[in-house]
Image (spheres, grey):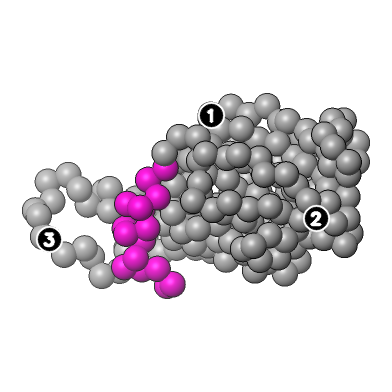
Amino acid sequence: MSITRHPDDSTLMSYAAGSLPGALAAVTAAHLSVCPRCHDEVAMMELLGGTLLSDLPGAAMGRPVPAAPEIEYAPPVGPIAAPAGEVPPPLARLIGHDLDALRWRWISRGLWLRWVPIAGGGKLHLFKGAPGVVVPEHGHHGSELTMVLRGTLADTTGEYGVGDVCDLDESVEHTPIAGAEGCVCVVAQDHSVRWRRLLVRLARPWHGM
Ligand SMILES: [Zn+2]
């Protein structure tokens, strides 16, 4: 699996802070289970978040942040286990391991949908597109996180393969098209406001580390 498209830093930070709605957290967790880069980034965010928080009580304003955290970050032993099938473990807990065993609802020519009940806010669904099918604009007013589980998907922001995530906010209108082999994707949508701007600003000092 060659992953080239990742969730935004703001999404990863919200995930690390435990503030992502359930649907978006499920897709992010699915991506983290197949993407060592984002997995490590979130681990680092959690570590830094803990360090900053533990530094807060009684800390004088302007006190320098310790140059190096005293806790040593231990990367997971060995490579992250690849999922046994197409469905990453965090999603398999919700939908099972077999995409073909799901009951799909036919939406339009070459397009099927499957809603997935999810706790914690946001909406989660899967869609299956036949080769070349154009996914109609589905009117998201908030954040939308799409991860490809099978095949490829393309829109104006680029092409997405298995494991890739398309992370959009409401400012982007897109009309995804299923690739030559069709595609199955999981999509999380959220209508509530995320702290996108604030988090991006906070992320900047160590972005690209
Ligand atoms: Zn990633």
In this view, the mark in front (2 or 3)? 2
Above or below residue 42? Residue 27 is above
Q: Secondary structure at mark 2?
A: strand
Q: Secondary structure at mark 3?
A: loop
Query: Seen in the image, is 38 located left or right of residue 192?
Result: right
Q: Which residue lies most toward the bottom here? A: 209
Q: Earlier in the sequence, mark 1 or mark 2?
A: 1
Which disc number belongs to residue 120? 1
Q: Work out which quarter of the rendered image holds the C terminus and state it.
A: bottom left
Return the x and y of residue 47 as percentages of the image width and height: 40, 56
Residue with the mark numbered 3: 63
**What is the C-alpha distance between the residues marked 1 and 2?**
29 Å
Q: Is residue 108 magenta?
A: no
Q: Is residue 175 visible?
A: yes
In this view, the mark in front (1 or 3)? 1
Range drawn in magenta: 194-209
Q: Earlier in the sequence, mark 1 or mark 3?
A: 3
Q: Residues within 10 Å of mark 1 (few under 14, many from 20)?
A: few
Amino acid, disc 2 = Ala
**What is the C-alpha distance between the residues marked 2 and 3?**
52 Å
Q: Residues within 10 Å of mark 3 (few under 14, many from 20)?
A: few
Residue with the mark numbered 2: 178
Q: Is mark 2 within 8 Å of ligand 1?
A: no
Return the x and y of residue 86 as percentages of the image width and height: 81, 51
Query: Seen in the image, is 118 located left or right of residue 62?
Result: right
Q: Quarter of the image holding residue 7?
A: bottom right
Q: Main secondary structure of the magenta part?
A: helix
Amino acid, disc 3 = Arg
Between residue 50 and residue 10, name the one nearer to us. 10
Residue found at x 49% / y 62%: 41
